[in-house]
Each structure stands twice: as C-alpha cells, then as structure tokens.
C-alpha cells in the first residue's frame, strides 16, 4: 500500500472516533447509556438502528470468510439469503411481540423474572465469554488481512491489534449506545462502498470478457447453488448451510444482548420490527456483494494464474489487495474492513459492559444512577482491553470460519434456548435449565473437535439445551 492508503485509513479512524463522541447524546443514567432511554424511535433513527444491526452482524470476519468460502465452493453461500426472510417472520410475528410483553428494562430481565437470579447470572456469564472471544476474533481477522495486504512484518501484529482495540474502546466508552448506533450506520455505508469498489475494479481489469468469466465459473462448478447431500461432514451442503446459519442468525437476533439493546432502544414492537426489516435488507446486500467478490476472485486467478498464490483460502483476498488493487482503492477497502470490525467491536463492548452493569453490579446492593453509569464506562474500558488481548490466542483454532462457528456453537446455542424458555414462561426448575446450558455448551465443543461440519455446532448445542428440560420432565418428574 502507498502513502495515500495509510492516509485514508488514518482519517477514517480519527473520523470514526470523532463521530462516536460527537453524537453521544444524553447520558444521565445507565439506561441512557446502554438503551438510549428507549427513545431511538423516529423514522430516521429506525433506519440507523437497522443499518447498525446489519453492520454488527457483518464484521471483518465476514470480509475474509464469505469471499474465501465462495472462492473454494462457489455460490452456495447465497443460500444464507434464504434464512433472512425466515428470521424476519419469526421475529415479527413471534419473538418481538412476546419480548415486549414482558415490559423489561434490560435485555436479560426476562430470564430472571422466569427462572430467578442464578439462571440469569449463568446466562450472563456464558454471554460474557461468548462476546470476549467473539470480539477477539473480530480483531484477529482484519489484522491478518491488513498484514498480508500491506506486506507488513508479522511483528506488527500486536500494534495493529492494539490500535483497533483502543480506538473502538475509546469512542464506545464516551459515546454510549447512541454513538455506537450512529457510527455503525455510517460504517455500514463504508462497507458497501469498499466492497463495491473492489468488485468493479476486478471485473473491469481481469483478462477475458464477462462471457469468459461466466464460462470459467460454470465449468469449475462455482455456479452450482446447492449440494443436497445428507452427510453431516459436508461443510456447505444445502442442509448444513440453511439450518446452521438460521440457528446462528436467530441466536444473534434473539439471545445476543447487542440485538436486544437495539430493540429496547426503539421502544416498541412496531419500531423494532421496522428496524429489523431494514437490517434484513442491508444484510442481504452485504451477503450478495461478498459472495460476488469471491466469484470474481475465483475467476481472476482462474484466468490469470499466479504461481505465488497462497494455498490458504483465507489469504486469497488479502493477497489480491496487496498485488492487484491500486493505491486509494486499497486504502478504501482496508477502511471498509476496519468499519466492519469496529461496528461489531463497539457494539460488543457496549453490550458486554451493559451485561456486567445490569446483570451483576446492580444485582448486589443499592446502586445510584451515577454509580451505575460510572461503572458502565469503566467496564467498557476493561472489556475492550480483554477482548483486544484475546485476539492473540485464536490463531490455533483453525480458519476464520471454523473459529466463528466454534464460538457460536459453544455459547450462542444454549443462550438461544434459555431465551425461548423465558419468553414462553415455561415452568422448569432453575437447576435443569442450568444443566441444559452446560450440556449444550459441551455438545457444541465436542462437535467442533469431530469430523462433523462446524456449522452443525450451533444447532447441536441449541437442540441439546432445549431438549434437556423436556427429557427431565418426561423421564423423572413434573416440575410444579
């Protein structure tokens, strides 16, 4: 990369931090800081919330995983689009009405109302570990991309990790949820522009016509949409992709405090549903563009063979940036990667600090509003630093795709089950709910160490956590 690229990246980082701080809004108490007081409900604000959810869902991980998977397997990842309308229907007609009926102030209040403080604390603990490791992956993925695409030495790994983590932490700590939502929405637009610029450049500069590109992709199986095998070891079959991605997405939309915070910030079922519909639209654009980018890369190196091409698919896109993308566009793309990373990072920091403040600190003893707000800000700093440090310990898990599915399977599946039990006011003992969570976590972890496709880890952990309470009631006793 050239000087102009580094200038674009530096300006972007400074601008993101400035916007997050400038739009922090009212912060008189913890509810203002974490839920915007439930007043983020105008039409324009709902659009911001929708784009914020979309930007949060697609991080720097997506920039590597979607193109790399498409590069190797073709357009099968477009099957992800099938899960979006299903997710919207379930949230619009089922989850959001029931969630708002509980009239809760904080995301996991519904768990405590139904199963007591202990289950809430267990769920919150699971969520804390989930988010810390997930945010570590968020920083790890784009750091690898920046090092490869800029041709930097591996010794710069930690300086880049710390830069991303510190910038994200600073404006999240000062800006609160309002600053996070607004910067997320802006970052979503940067993501779209960055990907679009690369796709346009690749199409207009590859050898051969569009017909040649299409013929190459068809002849090499990249345009085959679905593999209908029932083999659970097949990573990207129709069954594995649709079920695995659907459970992951629903887990994020239903059990992740980042999403629940945004629903509460809108203040009503109707407003939350409208913002979620905007998220579905934005997410579909990002998925389609990233898959198309993977196809373009496959055609580029199929028609323009390169003997130095990396063997690992995760490194194909960064290598393309380093060797093919001209100055200016490369900087814009790295800025888009950072936008995707920081949107998820800042949302995670805010949600996790809210979890520690509302689910732990406020549970023990009388706390003033100022005390809760002060603790929330301090916790943002601690969470940001811990997540940044965790990025250095994820390289041994495997590919970026495997890392994310392992984390989601172990933590997100059991949380999804607990939320379902809570919103439906199912009468199980707290002990058996906790047992289900533990067994679900163990199931996700076991699947990740077998030959079974990693995408089955979230559905597996969710199913076990969901069935354990019913099995206990069926075989042992009925809980009054």
Image (cartoon, rainbow, N blue to C red):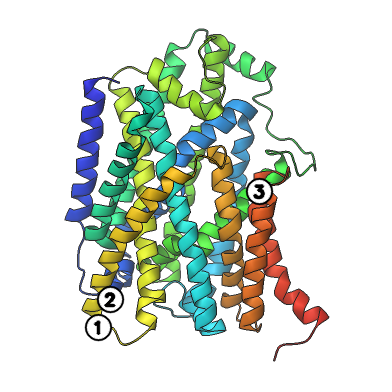
Please give the count of numbered marks on the rendered protein. 3
Residue 41 % position (x, y): 33, 65
The disc label shown at residue 372, or none: 2
Disc 3 to disc 2: CB gap under 8 Å: no
Q: Residue at x 35, y 36 (%)?
A: 336
Disc 1 to disc 2: CB gap under 8 Å: yes
Q: Residue at x 54, y 63 (%)?
A: 91
The disc label shown at residue 134, or none: none
Q: Which residue is under mark 3?
A: 448
In the foreground, 271 or 145: 145
Asked if residue 460 can be seen in this view, the reply is: yes
Q: Which residue is under mark 1?
A: 368
Q: Residue at x 49, y 82 (%)?
A: 117
Q: In the structure shown, which secondary structural element does the residue marked by tag 1 occupy?
A: loop
Based on the displayed image, in which of its 4 quarters is residue 320 positioned? top left
Instruction: Answer above or below: position of 324 versus 356.
Output: above
Residue 292 % position (x, y): 52, 29
Based on the displayed image, in which of its 4 quarters is residue 213 positioned? top right
Q: Residue furthest bottom?
A: 480
- Which circle's residue, 3 or 2, is located before the other in the chain? 2
In the foreground, 108 or 238: 108
Q: Nearer the viewer, mark 3 or mark 2?
A: 3
């Amino acid at each position: 990369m050239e000087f102009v690229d580094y200038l674009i990246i530096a300006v972007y980082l400074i601008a993101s931090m400035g916007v997050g701080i400038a739009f922090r809004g009212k912060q008189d108490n913890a509810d203002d800081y974490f839920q915007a007081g439930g007043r983020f409900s105008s039409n324009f604000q709902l659009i911001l919330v929708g784009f914020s959810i979309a930007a949060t869902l697609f991080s720097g991980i997506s920039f590597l995983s979607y193109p790399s998977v498409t590069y190797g397997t073709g357009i099968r990842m477009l099957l992800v689009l099938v899960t979006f309308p299903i997710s919207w229907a379930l949230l619009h007609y089922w989850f959001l009405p029931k969630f708002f009926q509980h009239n809760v102030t904080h995301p996991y209040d519904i768990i405590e109302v139904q199963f007591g403080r202990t289950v809430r604390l267990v769920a919150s603990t699971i969520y804390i570990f989930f988010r810390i490791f997930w945010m570590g992956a968020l920083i790890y993925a784009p750091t690898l991309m920046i090092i490869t695409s800029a041709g930097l030495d591996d010794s710069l790994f930690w300086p880049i990790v710390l830069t991303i983590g510190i910038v994200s932490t600073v404006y999240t700590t000062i800006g609160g949820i309002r600053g996070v939502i607004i910067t997320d929405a802006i970052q979503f637009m940067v993501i779209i522009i960055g990907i679009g610029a690369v796709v346009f450049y690749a199409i207009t500069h590859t050898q051969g016509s569009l017909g040649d590109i299409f013929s190459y992709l068809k002849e090499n199986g990249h345009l085959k949409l679905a593999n209908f095998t029932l083999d659970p070891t097949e990573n990207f079959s129709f069954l594995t992709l649709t079920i695995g991605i659907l459970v992951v997405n629903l887990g994020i939309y239903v059990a992740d405090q980042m999403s629940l915070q945004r629903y509460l910030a809108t203040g009503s079922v109707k407003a939350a549903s409208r913002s979620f519909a905007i998220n579905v639209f934005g997410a579909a654009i990002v998925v389609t563009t990233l898959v198309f980018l993977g196809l373009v890369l496959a055609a580029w190196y199929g028609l323009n063979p390169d003997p130095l091409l990396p063997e690992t698919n995760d490194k194909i896109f960064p290598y393309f940036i380093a060797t093919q993308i001209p100055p200016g566009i490369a900087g814009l793309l790295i800025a888009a990667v950072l936008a995707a990373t920081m949107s998820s990072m800042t949302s995670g920091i805010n949600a996790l600090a809210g979890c520690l403040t509302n689910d732990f600190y406020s549970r023990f003893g009388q706390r003033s509003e100022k005390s809760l707000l002060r603790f929330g800000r301090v916790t943002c700093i601690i969470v940001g630093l811990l997540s940044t440090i965790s990025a250095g310990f994820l390289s041994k898990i495997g590919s970026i795709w495997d890392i994310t599915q392992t984390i989601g399977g172990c933590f997100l599946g059991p949380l999804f089950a607990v939320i379902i039990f809570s919103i439906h006011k199912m009468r199980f003992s707290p002990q058996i709910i906790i047992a289900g969570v533990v067994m679900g976590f163990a199931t996700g972890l076991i699947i990740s160490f077998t030959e079974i496709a990693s995408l089955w880890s979230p559905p597996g952990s969710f199913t076990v956590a969901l069935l354990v309470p019913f099995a206990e009631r069926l075989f042992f006793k009925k809980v009054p």
